[in-house]
Amino acid sequence: MQPCPPRSAPYWLDLGDVAVVPLVELSRLPIEPEEFFPGSGQIPSATWCFDESWFDREASRLVFTIQAFLVVTENEVILVDGCVGSGKPRKRSHFDNLDPSWFTEFTNTGFTPEDVSTVVLSHLHVDHVGWTTQRTDHGWSPVFGNARHLVSQRELAYWSGDDGRAAMTRTGDYLADSVAPLAEHGLLDFAEDGRQIGRHVDLLDAPGHTPGNLCVRVTGSKAELLLAGDLLHHPLQLFDPDISTRYCVDPNQAAATRHDILTAVTARGMVLQTAHFAGISASRLNKEGSRYTLVPATDTIRTGQYHRP
Ligand SMILES: [Zn+2]
């Protein structure tokens, strides 16, 4: 198995009566800018979004993180996304046959898989669904056996249709080992815009990156947070929100959705936390002209290992 690179020091986000804990699988994943963002070469490399946390200047590679989030409320333990997963054969070498160190990140919180009440799959890309299942004597079995796993119906329909099946032949059929077993065990459920999960969490449609892409809003007594998933992948999309990735199913719709949601996040003073920004990136937004900058949400950031109450 491939050893995962070292993760950054642990931290968590304190929203008052809700905790949000990042569970990092790969802390520094380097990718060539034009491979990921066609047209991004026009952004001056002195711009703040090429800070060393987010750009490896020596290698000329953008730096990404792969992570999931645990949202802990008074009566819910909600896992948002499932990273790449362990021991799974994958075509992209960075994702192939990873070691299980992400699971230690999870158990370090003091929770067991049985404690997780809901798993939200923001969308069905390979780096968001992997830890939903693990290899057992019976094949690929659910990891979080007490949890309902929520996905948008439009998302599942897309990946089950012609375009989605064609994509699977290119990437390898990761849905067969990571999502199909959830349905077989009766753990897969549909979610849509406005779906409420307990008192503190609700889901927002964010189509474009994929047709049924979802964001997760977490409302605590001290702060409101948007787990924005893949609404943005890298801070350069705050410098230029029109830039979408090569992997967006509908790049124009992805940009329109990004504009809408960033406008709302800024107006409401919400904390933005994405799936792939490297380092401690939880921030509020400032808008200057057509561009955004990040203002670290230091009032919510707690360094050290989170442990369940
Ligand atoms: Zn992703």
Image (cartoon, helix red, strand yellow):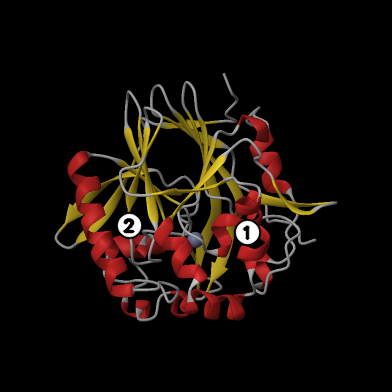
For the residue pair 224 and 238, the one nearer the viewer reads as 224
For the residue pair 141 and 50, the one nearer the viewer reads as 141
What is the quadrant of the N terminus in the image? bottom right
Between label 1 and label 2, give the one nearer the viewer: 1
What is the quadrant of the C terminus in the image? top right
Within 10 angstroms of label 1, few (less than 14), some, or many (20 or more) residues? some
Query: Which residue occupies 48% across, 62% down?
Result: 156
Residue that numbered label 1 is attached to? 180
Instruction: Find the residue positioned furthest to the right.
Output: 137
Any part of residue 131 in sight: no
Image height of 282 relative to 77, above or below: below
Query: Which residue occupies 27% across, 53% down?
Result: 293
Residue 63 lies left or right of residue 256; in this view the side is right
Q: Earlier in the sequence, mark 1 or mark 2?
A: 1
- Residue 206: mark in rendering: 2
Instruction: Find the residue positioned furthest to the top.
Output: 309
For the residue pair 84 and 236, the one nearer the viewer reads as 84
Asked if labels 2 and 1 touch by Cβ distance under 8 angstroms, the answer is no
Residue 101 location in percent, x, y?
72, 47
Amino acid tagged 2: Ala
Query: Which residue occupies 35% across, 81% down?
Result: 39
In the structure shown, which secondary structural element does the residue marked by tag 1 occupy?
helix
Within 10 angstroms of label 2, few (less than 14), some, or many (20 or more) residues? many
